[in-house]
Image (tube, rainbow, N blue to C red):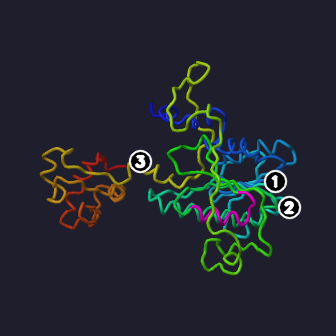
Amino acid sequence: MGRTSKDKRDVYYRLAKENGWRARSAFKLLQLDEEFQLFQDVTRAVDLCAAPGSWSQVLSQKIGSQGSGHVVAVDLQAMAPLPGVLQIQGDITQLSTAKEIIQHFEGCPADLVVCDGAPDVTGLHDVDEYMQAQLLLAALNIATHVLKPGGCFVAKIFRGRDVTLIYSQLRVFFSSVLCAKPRSSRNSSIEAFAVCQGYDPPHGFLPDLTKPLLDHSYDPDFNQLDGPTRIIVPFVTCGDLSSYDSDRSYPLDLEDGSEYKYTPPTQPPISPPYQEACTLKKKGWLAKEIRPQDCPISTVDTLPQPLAAPQCHTLLASEVWKHMAQGPQCPPPSVPLSTPKSHGFWGQNSLPYLPIAIKIMGKTKYNE
């Protein structure tokens, strides 16, 4: 049930697996191309913040199939290899990364630069919008090093309160700037894409990765440029209205009535940052909540008063396992315990209760 529930709730996630795409975001780039013909006459393309590689897949199939096309994918994280795609594991804010991109293109600039990167959202909209804006400007900054005049730049953007500042900065470098919302992008999300065409930097502009475009100290090259300070950018929806709605749940049997068959993801992540947390969770080594109401009455009565109180406490399982690995003869160490009021530690008078705490957690074996 768990594997099919997401297939019902997210039709583009299901279609991405069935069509061999690494992520549902591939449909976003395809729908943007249908609207703006992004791949027309493009032979050299750069995919920034590329992992897990769905946009690189699209670029490889649309551009690499021409024989003379070249695609470069850049990301801080490792990415599974893709045919026809050169991968660079590097930082887009470093000049060395820009030089490596140009080196792969044999000294020629790129025709198209795309960026579907996003920060780890916090849920605080103002913070998320600011972080996304900084990421977009970092992508724009490296694009000024590798993009040819007249080239195209596409990047994810969060439509927030101060988004017009980003639009005005993009208009300084491009003759056309549009805000596009693909059909596969959820309506409930503030995500959109800035489609910038006709790269035309101001006269005398010198790209410099050491000076972010949004830095107020960046006076010599950017703040003195003439141009609008506040503009209205057209908003364009991409994708036919008859296509699937990304916010709607669909039955598992979509069109031909054939029996649904679960399809695993095309490419699992390589060394994701959450891998360690998943491993600890499978082994039961993450912090667990101890609720006295879930314990036998006799056990609760033998616990210290703070633990026996009808509140939620957290015992760090890693400390328990350290003690268990040393064997039953080893004296138990002081175990960190967080309380609802403050974070403290069990004192020495609580050490005899460690085996009881281990029993509550369901870890009763000392020989592991």
Q: Which mark is residue 174?
A: none
Query: Which is nearer the N-term, disc 1 or disc 2?
Result: 1
The kind of secondary structure element at disc 2 is loop
User: Which is more toward the observer, 350 or 129?
Assistant: 129
Q: Give the vertical position of 245 relative to 282 (above or below).
A: above
Query: What residue is disc 2 on?
Result: 108
Give the CA separation, mark 1 to mark 3: 46 Å
Are the residues flagged by discs 1 and 2 in contact, CB closer than 8 Å?
yes
Q: Is residue 198 left or right of residue 336?
A: right
Q: Is residue 168 shown in magenta?
A: yes
Query: What residue is disc 1 on?
Result: 44
Q: Position of residue 42 (x, y in %)?
A: 82, 50
Give the CA separation, mark 3 to mark 2: 51 Å
Q: Give the vertical position of 163 relative to 33 (above or below).
A: below
Q: Is residue 156 shown in magenta?
A: no
Main secondary structure along the magenta-highlighted residues: helix
Give the CA separation, mark 1 to mark 2: 9 Å
Are the residues flagged by discs 3 and 2 in contact, CB closer than 8 Å?
no
Which residues are the magenta region? Answer: 163-176
Query: What residue is disc 3 on?
Result: 283
Query: Which is nearer the N-term, disc 3 or disc 2?
Result: 2
Q: Residue at x 49, y 56 (%)?
A: 121
The kind of secondary structure element at disc 3 is helix
Mark 2 crowd level (few <14, some 14–19, many ≥20, 10 Å Cα): some
Q: Position of residue 183 (x, y in %)?
A: 61, 40
Q: Give the vertical position of 99 relative to 10 (above or below).
A: below
Q: Residue at x 60, y 77 (%)?
A: 216
Q: Residue at x 62, y 37 (%)?
A: 16
Q: Please, what is the three-letter code of the amino acid marked with disc 2?
A: Cys
